[in-house]
Image (spheres, rainbow, N blue to C red):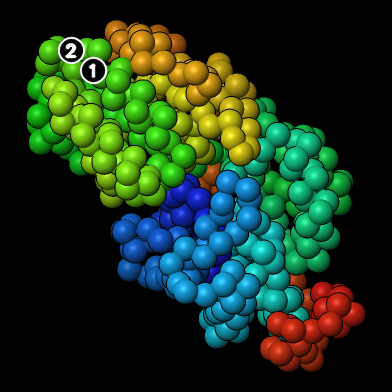
Amino acid sequence: MRLMVYSHDTFGLGNIRRMLAICNHLHKTVEDLSILIVSGSPMLQSFRVASGIDYIKLPCLKRFESGELGVRFLPMNTDEIICLRRELLLSTVISFKPDVLLVDKKPDGLAGELEPALRHVRCALPDTSVSLVLRDILDSPEPTIDEWTKRGYNNILHWYYDNILVLGSPHIFDVCAEYRIPPALSRKVTYCGYVLREDSLQDRKKLRAALGVGDDAALVLVTAGGGEDGFNVLLRSIEAAQRFGSDQSIRTVVVTGPELAIAERSRLTDLAEHSQGISVVEFLPDMLSHMHAADVVVSMGGYNTICELASLNKRAVVVPRVQPVMEQAIRMERMASYGPFITLSPTGLQADVLSDAILMQLGLRHENAGSNWELDMGALPRISTILDRHRIRRARPAPHPFSVEHLIHGSEDELSDAAAC
């Protein structure tokens, strides 16, 4: 069976890390499965992939603070890059002929780049199952509903999709109710639970020793994901670690992320060089093992980080992002009673408040009572079951005789006809 995974890019590492975790599990659990990932993530090649998993790298796009898309590397304008990506996606679907297509978050892709490929699937590959994969929370309801209405996502989901797989729990955030998903589409929704990280972990004691952390010392790991918007958390974490002074029983490792601005990374590195017990690195390909080695993690509130903390049952101090979307803040508010973490507001974050929270968590790290993450972590086996269920599915009507040229450049009336085929 052939699985194609579309994972959009533009901001951070979260989307590609989440989809890679899903792909690795599916590869281990679904018989005779070949997986092709298509993504523009600039860090895709930095992650380990198993034999039987391959990827196509799309030209990179980025998103400005205004929300507009731009080109990350190539000397081309945005429209040219989107057109190139659109044609690459369509040609991949035509050549690879996936039995299952998993789409990450955006039903029609960035700037609608996936829609021609979706039309081809529906018109020429009637047995192919198409599923949208959504994280637990996208944003607060009002802007999310407005965007879905503006983009016509409900219609796209109606025509092109068989399933909507929510990587979360309705007890924490009911996507159907919060985002007013119509009843007809709600029937396509499956709440899968959260993603348990299954990576092989390095030996904790050996890794701590390599970091210069003794048996009696504590390790604080600071991470801000890709790092593009994490400078304030990273800076305050270094300032908080400096307040520990010459106390050699606490070691702090700060991971800036590969997308932090060079000038900001240099500032953090210079600050750490003049402090004891603090080191700064740009990227850790095996972040999960380092989180496992840590006693407390300081992080933002991204979906993947929270799943990693829950997978490791790790104590944390979480400073959620509140701009440009409220996703992380909502997640931490709704999870207040589900895990052993302290949430701090990023607004006016001060080093003394952060250091107090870290010390509080370090003081409780050996306590067992009430320290477990209590999330449903069953997403991966549920997705495997769904994938297996769609091995044999009812064929749709015969393919519509539309050419590739029509799929990319067809008129509005022609495209409506194609969507209805």
Return the residue nearer the eye: 271 or 315: 271
Q: How many marks?
A: 2
Return the residue nearer the eye: 404 or 283: 283
The residue at 47%/25% (across/down) is 319
Which amino acid, by three-letter code, is at mark 1?
A: Gln
Answer yes or no: is residue 205 visible: no
Dots 2, 1 in contact, CB < 8 A = yes
The residue at 59%/27% (across/down) is 329
Instruction: Please name the residue that numbered disc 1 is placed on.
Output: 242
Residue 215 in percent (x, y) is at 11, 20
Return the residue nearer the eye: 125 or 296: 296
Q: Which residue is the extreme one toward the right?
A: 413
Vertical comparison of 256 with 120: above or below? above
Residue 308 in percent (x, y) is at 41, 36
**Quadrant of the image for the C terminus?**
bottom right
Instruction: Please name the residue that numbered disc 2 is placed on.
Output: 245
> In which image quadrant can residue 142 be found?
top right
Q: Is residue 395 left or right of residue 82?
A: right
The residue at 40%/11% (across/down) is 353
